[in-house]
Image: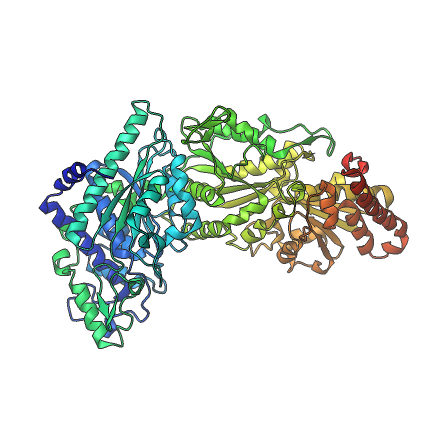
Amino acid sequence: MPTAQETATVASALGPAELGELLAHWRAANYLAAGQIYLMANPLLQEPLRPDHIKPRLLGHWGTSPGLNLVYTHLNRVIKARDLDALCIWGPGHGGPAVLANSWLDGTYSDTYPDVSRDGAGMAELFRQFSFPGGVPSHVAPETPGSIHEGGELGYSLAHAYGAACDNPGLLVACVIGDGEAETGPLAASWHANKFLDPVHDGAVLPVLHLNGYKIANPTVLARIPEGELDALLRGLGHEPVHVTGDDPETVHRAMAAAMDLALDRIARAQRRARTEGATERPRWPMIVLRTPKGWTGPREVDGKPVEGTWRAHQVPLPDVREDAGHLRQLEAWLRSYRPEELFDAEGRPRPGVLACVPDGNRRLGASPHANGGLLVRDLPIPPLERHAVRVETPGKELHEPTRVLGGLLESVMAATAARRDFRVVGPDETASNRLEALYAATGKAWQAETVASDEHLARDGRVMEVLSEHLCQGWLEGYLLTGRHGLFASYEAFAHIVDSMVNQHIKWLRTARRLPWRRPIASLNYLLTSHVWRQDHNGFSHQDPGFVDHVLNKSPEVVRVYLPPDANTLLSVADHALRSRDYVNVIVAGKQPGFDWLTLEEARAHCARGAGVWEWAGTEDGSRDPDVVLACAGDVPTQETLAAASLLRRHLPDLAVRVVNVVDLARLLPHEEHPHGMPDFEYDALFTRDKPVIFAYHGYPWLIHRLTYRRSGHEQLHVRGYKEEGTTTTPFDMVVRNDLDRYRLAMDAVDRVPGLGGRAIAVRQAMADARTRHHAWIREHGTDLPEVAEWTWDA
C-alpha cells in the first residue's frame, strides 16, 4: 500500500489549475459519450431538445464510460508530463463511446477520418454515426484509432497488454479491466503474466481494475468482496495494488493523479534497478484498483428507480426519450449538467483548457504507432530453406520428424532476430514435446519466477513462452502481432479448440482492418497444430480432435488459410510462406512423429505453390485417357495410407489406371468465387475428373471435404474417408483402421467404386478385408502393428 507520505507528496503536486483542466477534459468526454448514445442532431444543445434530435434506436453502453473517461484523462496527463510512449487496452465491454470521445478530443479521430472534424459539424457526425447503420460499432473496434483490442468479447485485455509489452522496453501499456471481465477464465489466468515480463527487455503493464459494481443485471464478484480480501488476492498474484475509491469528482481526480504518479514511479524504479543496477528479483508491479459508481454523473433516478450506481446504468439509462416527455427533459438536464458551453466554443471546437492535458503528435493514445502495428513491422530474416531441407533421393524411403526439421528453421529465425527481438514462439508447455527444442539453442523460455537446479532452458530474457493456458498464449501472441512483431503458436491439435472464440475475434479484426486504408498490414497469426489426431495413440480419445480446421474455414475467406503438408520439405515451404505473410490466420497441421519424405525441396515448393497436384510417380495412368479412379489425400498420415493403397492396387490390379492427387492448401477445393485460393471449375475438373470415382483420404472430419466441394461436378462420385470419432489408446495403424482410413479400406473402396471392377477383383477385395482381420488379431496378441505395415516403404 502507498505510504501516507507518498500519497500526500504526489497529491500535492496537482494544483487547482491543473485539477480544473482535468475536470474539464473529463466533463467534455462524458458529454461526448452520452451524446453519441442519444443525439443525431443539435449536438451543442443550441436549442431545446426535441424528439427529432434523438436517434430512433438507442444503442450503446453508458455505465462504464465515465470510468474509462477518467482513465483516459489521467493517462493523457502522465503521458504529457513524463513524455511517455504509451498504449491503452480498453477491456470493458462496449466502452466505445468513451474511447471515441477521447480520440475526437485529442484530434486523432479527425486526423484519421477528416469528415469527422473537431468542431460542431464533426461532433454532429461523431454522434450520428455511433451504433447507426453505416456507422461504427458500440464497442472499441478496428475502426477506433489507438485500439488493438476488440471490445465486444470479454476476457482477453490483460493478455493482449502483456503481449504488446513484450520486447517493447520503452512502452507503457495501460489496461483497463472491467469487473465483469475479471470474472472470465482467460482474465483470471492473465494475472500470472507478470511472472513472464522481463523488466530489462520488455515494457511495463499497468492494470487498472475498474470496479463499478455491476454487469448487465447482476453485481460483480470482485466488487462485492471486502476490500481487504481483494487486496490480498491481488497481492498474492504478485501485484502492488493502489486503491482509488469515491464518487466526488474532485476527490477522485486528485486520488487518481496520485495513484498514477505513484504507480509510474514504482515502474520506473523497478526498470532502473533491473536495467542499470543489475537486480534480478521479480518486481512486484503496481496496479490500480478504481472504484467509481456505475453510470457516474448520469441520471441518479429514473421513473422512481435508482440508476446511477446500479445495474440500470449499464446500457441506456433513459430508454424512452422520444416518446416520454419527462425522459426528454431529464436527458436535456443531464447533458446540460456538463456545461457544454464552457467546454466548446460557438463553432463546437474544444476550448484550450479542455485540451491542456492532451499530449502532442504520436504521444496521443489515438496516434500511437504501436496501435497500428503494420507501421512498425519488419520482414523476418528467414534463411534459405536449403540449409534445413532434407535430402530425398527416392520418395517414401527415408523418414524424418517434420516438426523437428521445422525447429531448425525456427531456431535460425530466432537467432537472426536476437538483437531486434521481434519474433516469439508461444505454446502450452509443449515446445520440446512438439520437437521444436532446437529453439533453445537461440533462446530460453521466458521465466521470472523461482528457478531450481533441475530446471532447463529457463531464461529471464527468453522468447519462447510456455504456460498451460491456451487463452494466455493466444492473447500474448495477438498483442505481440498487433503491435508490429511476428510469432508462431504451437499446440497439440485437439486443444487448439480452447481458443476457438479468440481466433474468431482476431479473424473478424483482420477482416475489418483490411477494409480500413489507414490500418497497415500486420504479420499473420500462425498456428502449428501437431501431436495430431492420428498420432495421439498413446494419449487416447480425449486428445483426438481435428476440428479446429472446420472452425477456421467457416470464417472470412480473405483471411483464413489452412495447410496440410505431407512431409518435412513441404512443411518448410509452407512455414516459409506463412511467416512472410501479412493479415492472415494460417493454420498448419503437421505431425511430429517420423514420417516419410516424399518430395525434394524444389518439388515441395512447386507443389505448395499449386496447393494441390497430381503425383505422377505414385499413380499408374499413362496420360492417354482419364484414370479409372482418383486417390486423393490431404494430411501426412492420409498421404501415407493413400500411397500404400496405390502400391497395393499397382501390385494386385496392374491394369487399373490410378491417379494420386495430394492437397496441401485445403482452400483450393473451394470454388474460386468463394475463396481467393479456390480453383476454377475447369482446373478442378482437370485434377479430379468430372465423372470418375474419387476416394479422398482426409486428415479430419470427412464431411468438411464434402462441404468444400458440394458444388463441383462429379460430387456424387466423391467418397471421403477421415476421422469419425473412433479413438482410444492403441497402435498408430489401428487408429486409421478404426476410422476406415487405412490402406486396405482405401483399396477396397477403389474396387467397390470403379464400375465393373467389383466382380473381376473380388479376390483382391477379399485379401484386403483379410488383412484388416489379421491386423485386429495381431495387435491384440503383440501390442504392435503388423510387420507389413510397420516396415512398409514405397516400392514402386
Seen from the viewer's position, the closer of residues 609 and 411 is: 411
Seen from the viewer's position, the closer of residues 309 and 721 is: 309
Q: Tell me what residue is drawn at x 58 percent, y 44 percent.
A: 493
Seen from the viewer's position, the closer of residues 647 and 20 is: 20
Q: Is residue 761 left or right of residue 50?
A: right
Q: Tell me what residue is drawn at x 26 percent, y 32 percent.
A: 268
Please state the horizontal and vertical placement of residue 470, each as a whole percent of the image: 49, 44
Does the image show residue 112?
no
Query: In the figure, 441 relative to 783: above or below?
Result: above
Colour convention: rainbow
Does the image show residue 228?
yes
Question: Which image quadrant for residue 398?
Answer: top right
Query: In the figure, 673 relative to 392: above or below?
Result: below
Question: Which image quadrant for residue 370?
Answer: top left
Q: Residue furthest left?
A: 16
Quadrant location of the N terminus in the rendered image: top left
Q: Is residue 246 left or right of residue 212?
A: left
Please state the horizontal and vertical placement of residue 740, each as a whole percent of the image: 74, 50
